[in-house]
Each structure stands twice: as structure tokens, then as C-alpha cells.
């Protein structure tokens, strides 16, 4: 872990995969399908997210999953590990190193999408690649993601009883298609933002989850954003990839309060585990689905965390 500082500058690492539209891994001489790279300034790139991370005084870099081995040496210089769309099934030894790193204060963000397996037109929206690689890492912590529901744009927020300071002001999270997170009621995982038809939670869209194959948790609560505490560290699971990208179809980083939620998540996961946790308290944006993120951009000037 990085050393302590008054304004903690975290080292963030983003892990991505490589798949062709027809599901071939790696893509080889075909065009990679929706890699969502930090260096990509196009509509499906993550350059705006990278800029967001750097605006908080953190550093961020990216690694290809198939060229990455998770071990103690690899994790020693990392504070926040983000698993984007990827295809690698991490070994038991790698998962144990990750678990030890989390216990010591590491922070992890992960999400799933049908695009992990390729284009839905070729491999199907309910292909299980993204679900399988994601659950391989998070089910130990009382969470599982569904396959892609492919049923439209939707947005949710926390209820009036705020479950965690990350959700102060009840920011609104929007995604499209989405892979809701099943939470084991017997674990310490919590729904930061429930995927629920309760009017306190549902902002827009429907809450149907017709595709629950491979979910083995009994009587789960479903979430759009979930948090599990692991020793001094944390795992946060997001229900969709689209809040991350620049301006792709469906939702994107500028919609609703997606940008502000991501800012809070990175700062929370990257805080120095040797100090008391900081409470994010930046007022959220208006929640207008057509918002361009202007308010959120101004918020980035504030050194809240």
C-alpha cells in the first residue's frame, strides 16, 4: 500500500480484457470489441473516467488481464484495483493474494456486462462470460452478478435511510441493460443502491430481473451498487459498464449522478487504510437525465476526500 499523506494520493490500476465481436479471445487480427480503454477518447472509451481519477490527485494506469498475474508483488504498489470487462479466470492462488491485499486495506471496483463475451448480436446478451469472471472474484464476499438483463435504461438511488456515507444526498445511478447484484443476506455485503421497485429507490425504468441463471444465493436482495467490507478493505460491485464510458449508447458517465458516484467510490476505495475513513459529502447534481455533468465537473474542484 502507498504511504500515508494528508491528502491521500492513491495508485489506481484498471484491468481490461480483449475479445472480438464473435467471442474470440484474444481478438487477434479482428477488431477488439468494446475494450473501454483509459486512453480511448471515443464514445466507448474511459478517458473521462481517467481524467476524473487524476483530478482527485490519484494516478491511474491500465493492464491487459492475460498479461497480469495477481500476487503480492504485483499488488504491493496498488491502492485501488478496477476490473473492467475482461475474460481471464483468476486462479485460486491469485484470488488468495487479492483477498490478503483487501484485508490489508486494498479497494476493488468491479462490474459485469454481456460485452465481456463479445457482441450480443453474435454471442447473445445472456452469455455468461462477464458473469463468470466477475463472480469468480466476488462471490467469496457475499455477492453475485446476474447475466445481462438487456431490458432498457434504468436508474436508482438509495432510500431515505442512507446505508453508508458514500450515498449522502442520495445520488442517482443510471445504467442500461444491467447485471444486478445479488446480495447474500447472511453476508456483510450491503446494497448501497437497491435495485428495487420501491418508489424510494426507483427513479426510472423497470426492475424486472427475468434472467437469474447461475445465481446460487438464496433469497438475495438485488442491488445496483453493492459494498462488502473485507478486513480493512472494501469491494464495490457496479451493475453496469455504461456509467464508466465517455458517451456511448444507453447511459454514460455524464448521465444522472454517475460521475459523482464514481468520484466518491474511487476516493473511498483509495483512502489510506491507516487513517480514519473520510465521509464524502459533496452535494449531488440535479439528477436530470439530460445533465451534461457540468455540476459534477465543478464538484471535482472540491477536495472533499
Image (cartoon, rainbow, N blue to C red):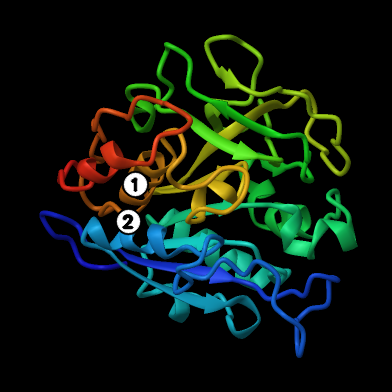
- The residue sitting at 66% across, 81% down in the picture is 66
Tell me if mark 1 has few (under 14), some (14-19) or many (20+) residues whose alpha carbon lies within 10 angstroms of its own: many
- Name the foreground residue: 235 vs 176: 176
Q: Is residue 15 left or right of residue 283?
A: right
- Name the foreground residue: 55 vs 252: 252
Q: Is residue 108 left or right of residue 219?
A: left
Q: Is residue 276 visible?
A: no
Tell me the residue that label 2 is attached to.
52
- Where in the figure is residue 59, as x and y percent of width and height? 29, 69
Give the CA distance from mark 2 to mark 1.
Answer: 7 Å
Q: With respect to residue 259, does 11 lie above or below? A: below
- The residue sitting at 31% across, 29% down in the picture is 284
- Name the foreground residue: 176 vs 127: 176
Disc 1, SS: helix
The numbered mark, 2 or 1, whose residue comes first in the sequence reads 2
- Where in the figure is residue 292, as x and y percent of width and height? 38, 41
- The residue sitting at 58% across, 80% down in the picture is 69
Disc 2, SS: helix
- Where in the figure is residue 10, as x and y percent of width and height? 28, 62
Image quarter of the C terminus: top left
Tell me if mark 2 has few (under 14), some (14-19) or many (20+) residues whose alpha carbon lies within 10 angstroms of its own: some
Q: Is residue 275 left or right of residue 95?
A: left
Which image quadrant is residue 84 in? bottom right
- The residue sitting at 55% across, 25% down in the picture is 156
Q: How many marks?
A: 2
Image quarter of the N terminus: bottom left
Tell me the residue that label 1 is attached to.
263
Q: With respect to residue 64, does 272 lie above or below? A: above
- Where in the figure is residue 63, as x and y percent of width and height? 52, 78
- Name the foreground residue: 257 vs 223: 257
Asked if the residue under mark 1 is in contact with the one under mark 2, i.e. CB atoms within 8 Å, the reply is yes
Foreground: disc 2 or disc 1:
2
Amino acid at each position: 500500500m502507498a504511504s500515508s499523506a494528508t491528502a491521500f494520493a492513491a495508485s489506481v490500476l484498471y484491468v481490461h480484457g480483449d475479445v472480438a465481436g464473435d467471442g474470440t479471445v484474444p481478438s487477434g487480427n479482428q477488431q477488439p470489441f468494446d475494450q473501454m480503454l483509459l486512453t480511448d477518447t471515443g464514445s466507448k472509451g474511459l478517458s473521462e473516467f481517467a481524467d476524473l481519477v487524476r483530478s482527485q490527485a490519484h494516478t491511474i494506469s491500465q493492464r491487459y488481464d492475460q498479461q497480469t498475474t495477481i500476487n503480492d508483488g504485483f499488488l504491493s504498489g496498488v491502492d485501488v484495483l478496477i476490473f473492467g470487462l475482461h475474460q481471464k479466470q483468476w486462479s485460486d492462488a491469485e484470488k488468495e493474494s487479492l483477498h490478503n491485499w483487501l484485508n490489508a486495506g486494498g479497494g476493488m471496483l468491479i462490474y459485469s456486462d454481456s460485452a465481456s463475451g463479445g457482441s450480443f448480436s453474435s454471442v447473445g446478451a445472456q452469455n455468461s462470460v462477464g458473469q463468470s469472471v466477475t463472480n469468480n472474484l466476488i462471490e467469496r464476499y457475499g455477492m453475485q452478478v446476474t447475466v445481462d438483463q438487456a431490458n432498457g435504461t434504468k436508474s436508482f438511488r438509495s432510500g431515505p435511510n442512507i446505508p453508508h456515507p458514500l450515498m449522502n444526498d442520495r445520488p442517482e445511478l443510471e445504467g442500461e441493460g444491467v447485471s444486478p447484484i445479488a446480495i447474500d443476506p447472511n453476508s456483510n455485503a450491503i446494497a448501497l443502491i437497491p435495485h428495487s421497485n420501491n418508489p424510494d429507490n426507483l427513479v426510472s425504468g423497470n426492475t424486472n430481473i427475468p434472467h437469474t441463471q447461475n445465481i446460487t444465493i438464496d433469497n438475495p436482495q438485488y442491488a445496483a451498487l453493492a459494498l462488502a467490507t473485507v478486513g480493512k478493505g472494501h469491494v464495490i460491485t457496479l451493475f453496469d459498464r455504461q456509467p464508466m464510458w465517455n458517451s456511448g449508447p444507453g447511459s454514460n458517465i455524464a448521465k444522472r449522478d454517475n460521475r459523482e458516484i464514481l468520484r466518491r467510490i474511487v476516493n473511498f476505495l483509495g483512502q489510506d487504510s491507516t487513517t480514519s475513513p473520510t465521509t464524502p459529502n459533496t452535494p449531488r447534481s440535479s439528477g436530470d437525465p439530460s445533465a451534461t455533468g457540468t455540476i459534477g465537473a465543478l464538484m471535482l474542484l472540491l477536495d472533499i476526500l
